[in-house]
Image: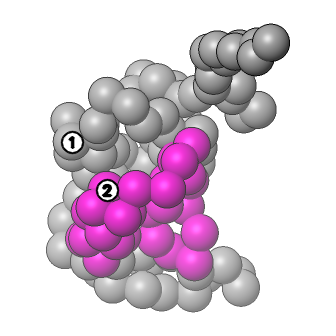
Amino acid sequence: MKWKRKFKIKKIYLLPMWTRDKSKSWIKKTCGTGWLKLVDEVYDKLPNDLHINQAYQKWGLLMFDIDEDNQEFESFLEIIKIKSSETCEICGSQGKEVTIENWIHTRCIDHV
């Protein structure tokens, strides 16, 4: 007698999913308002089957962690990272990498 079992695989999220509002709130709190348009760009292009686990600044760049591998979306996140390297994290103007008190930031001339 053969037994067949059908298992329904359910995604288990080990990390909480970040909403657009949570991501924007965290980036605004930790960096300023300059990258909020970039956060919106990410959420506008986020595929339905992916979720953001974290949005943060590291080495003066805007970064996102996602819950699954997706080469196409990860390539898009690299473009966002490059855009953030040229955008002041405080105001959104043209910026560049600067070091302030041993921390790397992306800032315009007015916010150095």
Residue 62 visible, this angle: yes
Horizontal and vertical percent position of residue 94: 19, 74
Q: Alpha-carbon neighbours of circle 1 within 10 Å: few (<14), some, or many (≥20)?
A: few
Q: Is tag 2's residue or tag 1's residue first in the polypeptide sequence?
A: 1
Amino acid at dot 2: Phe
Residue 80 visible, this angle: no
Amino acid at dot 1: Lys
The residue that label 1 is drawn on is: 45
Disc on res. 107: none
Compared across the picture, whether 70 is left or right of 10 comes to left
Horizontal and vertical percent position of residue 93: 19, 65
| 98 falls in the magenta region | no
Q: In the image, which residues are magenta? A: 55-84
Residue at x 53% of width, y 48% of height: 68
Q: SS for tag 2?
A: helix
Choose top left, top right, bottom left or bottom right for residue 75.
Answer: bottom left
- Identify whether 43 is placed above or below 91: above
Image quadrant containing the C terminus: bottom left
Of residues 8 and 3, which is closer to you in this image? 3
Compared across the picture, whether 111 is left or right of 100 comes to left
The residue that label 2 is drawn on is: 73
